């Protein structure tokens, strides 16, 4: 119960953190529409961790270069990409979705149940810039858990 009282105290901050955000300017203009829709690259090709860990993960510069050593090499944004690669620097992507720390979420369990990415993230393959679609509120999580007969126990999401 102590944990839940602490949770209640963190409420105001949690609401700020989970508010849907605008389109942040990313260090490289990366388009999901081009990659996931036009060129049909599967979500899991880049977000490979989603089937085996809590996080979905963002692909490494090396993974991008697997194609971009040969593909679109003269485009300005791809030249920027090659710059990160040759300096051995990770790309400082700005994170869009994030739950407050007191919430436990795992991609693995959801993805292994064949819940499509789009059920929570919307049609990312139509987006040139990713924006948050699912509100990521407790009510939103619980509504689907109720519908899918998944756990409603507080400790499932607040460990
Ligand atoms: C399926 C996941 C899930 C379950 C089950 C769940 N919660 Fe939450 N809870 C969340 C998420 C996500 C947030 C953060 C977003 C928000 O505040 O809406 C949250 C936020 C909270 C907060 C902070 C409130 C605030 O105003 O920000 C409290 C307190 C809380 N939960 C208590 C509970 C209690 C008590 C239960 C059991 C009756 C419970 N939760 C069950 C996902 C869950
Ligand atoms: C070619 C690699 C690639 C493919 C394919 C890809 N993504 Fe991404 N994804 C990225 C990169 C890089 C980012 C970080 C930059 C950004 O936010 O645009 C990202 C970011 C995201 C984010 C936002 C993460 C955050 O910061 O909260 C979501 C959600 C997402 N991808 C879902 C998907 C879905 C769903 C698909 C399939 C329809 C998909 N991605 C296909 C590379 C990819
Ligand atoms: C599986 C192959 C593949 C991977 C992996 C891949 N891309 Fe691409 N990328 C492409 C293709 C194909 C195009 C489109 C080229 C064209 O328009 O002719 C493209 C286009 C681009 C463009 C140029 C868009 C434009 O029109 O100017 C950028 C920038 C880009 N990718 C960045 C990235 C980044 C960053 C990553 C890693 C997160 C990545 N790509 C991973 C295949 C890939
Ligand atoms: C049941 C809802 C749900 C499904 C299904 C889902 N996600 Fe997520 N995703 C979330 C939530 C919630 C967050 C924020 C997690 C956090 O802050 O801890 C998130 C965050 C992310 C992020 C950024 C943080 C990270 O984990 O790397 C990426 C990228 C992402 N999702 C991609 C995907 C892809 C790709 C799929 C499909 C393979 C997918 N998601 C399926 C709910 C979902
Ligand atoms: C689109 C529907 C959907 C949404 C939205 C959703 N979930 Fe789930 N979740 C499920 C289903 C279905 C399961 C059961 C998976 C299984 O049985 O393997 C599950 C399972 C879980 C589990 C694992 C339960 C366990 O017993 O280990 C956690 C933790 C969880 N969800 C947290 C969350 C949180 C936190 C959110 C919101 C940020 C959320 N979920 C949003 C459908 C959803």
Image (cartoon, rainbow, N blue to C red):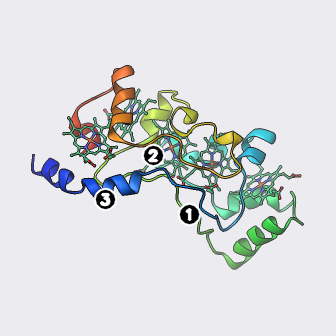
Disc 2 residue lies near ligand 4 with CB under 8 A: no
Neighbour class for label 3 at 10 Å: few (<14), some, many (≥20)? Answer: few
Neighbour class for label 2 at 10 Å: few (<14), some, many (≥20)? Answer: few
Residue 24 rendering spot, x and y as whole percentages? 59, 61
| Quarter occupied by residue 108 | top left
Check the image and report above or below for 126 versus 146.
below
On the rendered image, what quadrant is the N terminus found in? top left
SS at badge 2: loop
Front label number (3 vs 2): 3
Calculate the distance from the C-alpha at mark 1 to the C-alpha at mark 3. 20 Å
In the rendered image, the residue lying farthest to the bottom is 87
**Residue at position x 83%, y 68% in the image:** 76
Q: Camera-side residue: 15 or 7?
A: 15
Looking at marks 3 and 2 on the same chain, the residue that comes earlier in the sequence is marked by 3
Q: Which residue is mark 2?
A: 53
Front label number (2 vs 1): 1
Check the image and report above or below for 102 versus 150.
below
**Residue at position x 71%, y 50% in the image:** 128
Disc 1 residue lies near ligand 2 with CB under 8 A: yes
Q: Which residue is mark 3?
A: 13
Q: Which residue is mark 1?
A: 94
Q: Camera-side residue: 81 or 99?
A: 99
Residue 130 rendering spot, x and y as whole percentages? 62, 50
């Amino acid at each position: 119960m102590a944990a839940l009282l602490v949770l209640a105290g963190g409420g105001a901050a949690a609401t700020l953190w989970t508010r849907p955000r605008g389109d942040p300017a990313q260090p490289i203009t990366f388009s999901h529409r081009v990659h996931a829709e036009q060129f049909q690259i599967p979500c899991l090709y880049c977000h490979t961790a989603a089937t085996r860990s809590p996080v979905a993960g963002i692909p490494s510069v090396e993974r991008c270069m697997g194609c971009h050593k040969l593909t679109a090499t003269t485009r300005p944004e791809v030249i920027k990409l090659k710059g990160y690669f040759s300096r051995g620097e990770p790309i400082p992507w700005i994170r869009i979705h994030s739950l407050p720390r007191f919430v436990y979420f795992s991609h693995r369990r959801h993805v292994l149940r064949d819940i499509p990415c789009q059920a929570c993230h919307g049609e990312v393959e139509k987006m040139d810039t990713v924006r948050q679609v699912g509100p990521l509120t407790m009510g939103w999580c619980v509504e689907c858990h109720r519908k899918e007969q998944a756990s409603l126990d507080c400790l499932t999401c607040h460990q």
